[in-house]
């Protein structure tokens, strides 16, 4: 019997294009690992969604908050391993097998690489868009027994930064798996967001305040 892995994928399928993007991501994930059973939970903000093939849809009824969507999805998860990911990705064949092998029993948090590489190595670190790619994170479920829920202080921007602070505060290492690739297609949802600069600026203020708390708790 193959592995079973839970997947939490926030989305907002308010247009046909966005719904198609999510379905393409689901299809790519399922195809990438035929020997793995994926329990995929799409956390969707569109209450009129038609749902998605090979996935269960959970509707959220609060203002969009990326980590809050992930926390909602975690309530439905019970597999040993879990993927926290965007809905705009393309997965290389065998990517997750490589990540899980690299994590083994030593690491609780990992990201695949964003470029193709044959190097069988891992890099420890918390650098955003470097070692820690917020759009695809693989975790051991027991991680949340240590850090608790994902921090919901920020709504979208800096969600990965605040996750890194949670890991560092708890002394948990994160790794980048060099020979595993997942391509980030770029968020089309964000193209619909107005005043992105002002929103990002406000989120930075929130993150900076939370970071002080995490640093103080070490």
Image (cartoon, rainbow, N blue to C red):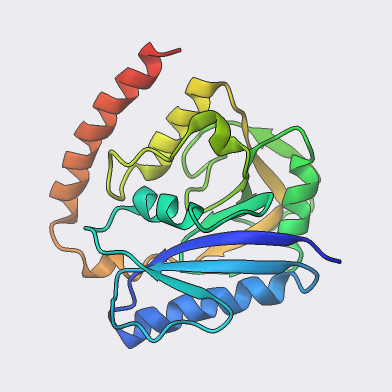
Q: Residue at position x 61%, y 67% from top?
A: 39
| Residue at the image position 34 percent from the left and 77 percent from the top | 13
Residue 47 appears at what percent x and percent y?
A: 28, 77
Q: Is 205 rendered above or below residue 6?
A: above
For the C terminus, the image quarter is top left
Nearer the observer, 200 or 37: 37
- Picture coordinates of residue 44, whole percent (x, y): 36, 70
**Residue 168 to residue 20: above or below:** above
**At 38% across and 65% down in the image, what residue appears?**
187
Where is residue 9? Give x, y as percent.
Answer: 47, 63
Horizontally, is 90 left or right of 180 in the view?
left
**Count the marks: how many?**
0
Q: In the picture provided, is 3 more to the left or to the right than 66?
A: right
Q: Position of residue 164 (x, y in %)?
A: 47, 33
Give residue 2's quadrant in the image. Answer: bottom right
Q: Is residue 116 left or right of residue 143?
A: right
56 and 92: which is toward the camera:
56
Residue 92 shows in the view: no
Q: Residue at x 16, y 40 (%)?
A: 202
Give 151 or 175, whichever is nearer the viewer. 151
Above or below — where is 113 with respect to 213?
below
**Furthest residue toward right:** 1
Look at the image and tell me in which quarter the N terminus lies.
bottom right
* Among the 4 quarters of the image, the one containing residue 108: top right
Location of residue 173 with respect to 113 vertically, above or below: above
- Residue 160 visible, this orientation: yes
């Amino acid at each position: 019997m193959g592995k079973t892995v839970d997947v939490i994928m926030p989305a907002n399928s308010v247009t046909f294009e966005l719904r198609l993007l999510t379905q393409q991501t689901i299809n790519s994930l399922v195809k990438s690992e035929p020997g793995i059973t994926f329990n995929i939970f799409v956390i969707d903000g569109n209450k009129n969604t038609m749902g998605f093939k090979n996935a269960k849809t959970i509707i959220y009824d609060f203002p969009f908050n990326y980590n809050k969507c992930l926390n909602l999805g975690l309530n439905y998860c019970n597999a040993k391993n879990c993927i926290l990911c965007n809905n705009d990705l393309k997965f290389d064949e065998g990517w997750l097998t490589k990540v899980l092998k690299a994590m083994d029993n030593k690491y609780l948090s990992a990201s695949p690489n964003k470029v193709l590489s044959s190097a069988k190595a891992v890099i420890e670190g918390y650098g955003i868009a470097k070692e820690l790619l917020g759009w695809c994170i693989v975790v051991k479920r027991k991680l949340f027994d240590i850090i608790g829920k994902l921090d919901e202080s920020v709504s979208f921007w800096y969600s990965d930064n605040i996750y890194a602070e949670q890991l560092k505060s708890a002394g948990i290492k994160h790794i980048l798996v060099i020979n595993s690739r997942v391509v980030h297609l770029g968020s089309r949802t964000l193209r619909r967001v107005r005043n992105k600069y002002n929103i990002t600026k406000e989120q930075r203020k929130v993150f900076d305040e939370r970071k002080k708390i995490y640093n103080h708790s070490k």
